[in-house]
Image (cartoon, rainbow, N blue to C red):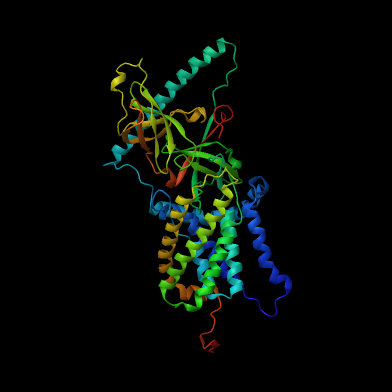
Amino acid sequence: MSRLPHQSTASRLLMPGVVIVLIVLSLARLSWVDWLNSVAKIPTAILTPGSAVVSLASGWVLPAKRPVVTSERERALVEELEHWKTLYQREDRNNERLRKQIAELQRGRLINPESNITQLVAPVVGMSSDLSSGVLRVRAGESVGVVQGTVAVTDGVQIVGRVTSVSGPTSLIQPVTRKGGPKVAGRVMVDEPNNIGLKCLLEPIGSRFRGVVEAPESSLPNAGSLKPEPGHTVRLDDDRWPESAQRFVLGKVERVEADSSNPLRTIVTVVPTVEVERVSEVTLRIASDLGRGGTP
Amino acid sequence: MNAIAVLVAGYICFSLELGLRKALAVGSAGIAPSFVFILCVVVSLSAPPSVAMWTCLILGLLTDLTWPHEIAGGVSTQVIVGPYAIAYLVASQFVLSIRGNMFRRNPLTLGFLCCFGMAIAQVVVVAIYTFRSGYTPEIAWDPTSQLLARLGVALYTGLVGIIVGVFAGPLTSALGVHQPPQRRFTRPIY
């Protein structure tokens, strides 16, 4: 740094002092710098409108890639099919849950009542400028009831991720496919009409999942022929997620490989139906059951 | 330097950086250029050293404050102040130290400085996070993949810097950054 003759001692020491403070802050323990989250709300609130405008414009010019359909009618049919499949899966799961609930009630256990869902469409107003942070910022916050752990979906059924932080008018969503994120339990629907799925534990690897599929239970009819294949839908079946998000779509099986270490198991690569890290808007499913099944 | 012009340029650059990231991202790592850093280089290339360094420090500080990091496997987020502020300051010092040897009117100059300056800045960021990952297990950190991806960011920023370099002359004038006089035998030519 140049030092001009007219600079005072204080101004000459200012830059080294600031640098020392920044070094200390950058290396401080996380618990010591928790207060910075509040400070960060100010620049975020100022910069969000500008990035929102640019983000919306870029989303209009370069929309997220979706499966190619030949006509509008086909697109409508595909969406309707997915919608009804999801409804069926959810009802089936509800039945299963109710059966368990009756059993629990008979044993005198208290069961939480049916959860209420409020859906809210929120635009994505920006992504992280840092590579190590892949969160999406959406324009919906505390004022509309968004809480930590709220599930975000797109296209009605495709899971995008969960809200990790709510600050004023915006929220941060960690994409479910984010590399290094927590593993997700799901079911590869090998026989969707009969609601037969194989359990799998998927690890996010960035825009995709990869994980091991368990062998079908021997009690199932034709257990030997139930194998995951490319194109099969993978649905969420994870108790760590809110009840309201169960059986939503994680993606489609893209590739199937044999697990060399265990011949009974298969490794699948699952790709979401939409590039979840590049969506322009999400639907937030604000549930009241976050406390019991949906620890974020 | 025209502080208001730099403020407006900073706002535009942050809007482009945050808003265009998903559109310009390449690969699964999400490699995208940094418009804020290009502004840092433009200022560092022409402004007086102290002004350039303070500007880069503030822009780096805002970069730190703008986006929190995921901790504990994405359960929550935490703002960490310092890595980018220090990194942009070091990069600014790099530009200041070699700018006398550069042909400033050549668009390739801005691209070159953006590329190498960003590479230096990202090395500093990775070094800080790698150091703190030793006692902060909450932040998932893989130094090798991060460094490789961030060098990709540097390359991408350099390419965008060449495009911006075409307009560097008018941009420098708009920002009002000082153009030091040409020198011959260490004496300024007025």
Residue located farthest toward the left when viewing the structure as drawn: A70
Residue B183 x, y percent position in the rendering: 52, 86
Question: Where residue A135 appears, x then y in whole percent?
Answer: 51, 46
How many numbered marks have been drawn onto this rendered protein structure?
Answer: 0
The residue nearer to you, when weighing B173 against A78, is: B173
Image quadrant assignment for residue A7: bottom right
Visible residue check, residue A23? yes
Q: Where the C terminus of chain A falls, by quadrant?
A: top right
Q: Nearer the viewer, residue A56 or A107?
A: A107
Tell me which residue sits at (51%, 59%) in the image: B123
A131 versus A294 height, above or below? below
Q: Which residue appears farthest toward the front when viewing the image? A: A261
Q: Is residue B166 visible?
A: no
Q: Is residue A253 left or right of residue B33?
A: left
**With respect to residue A176, does A228 lie above or below?**
above
- The front one of B27 and A235 is B27
Q: Position of residue A238 (x, y in %)?
A: 48, 28
Quadrant in the rendering for residue A289: top right
Q: Quadrant of the N terminus of chain A?
A: bottom right
* x then y, percent, for residue A221: 31, 16
Compared to A61, does A2 lie above or below? below
The answer to whether A285 appears left or right of A231 in the picture is right
> Residue at coordinates 47% horizontally, 75% vertically from top-left?
B170
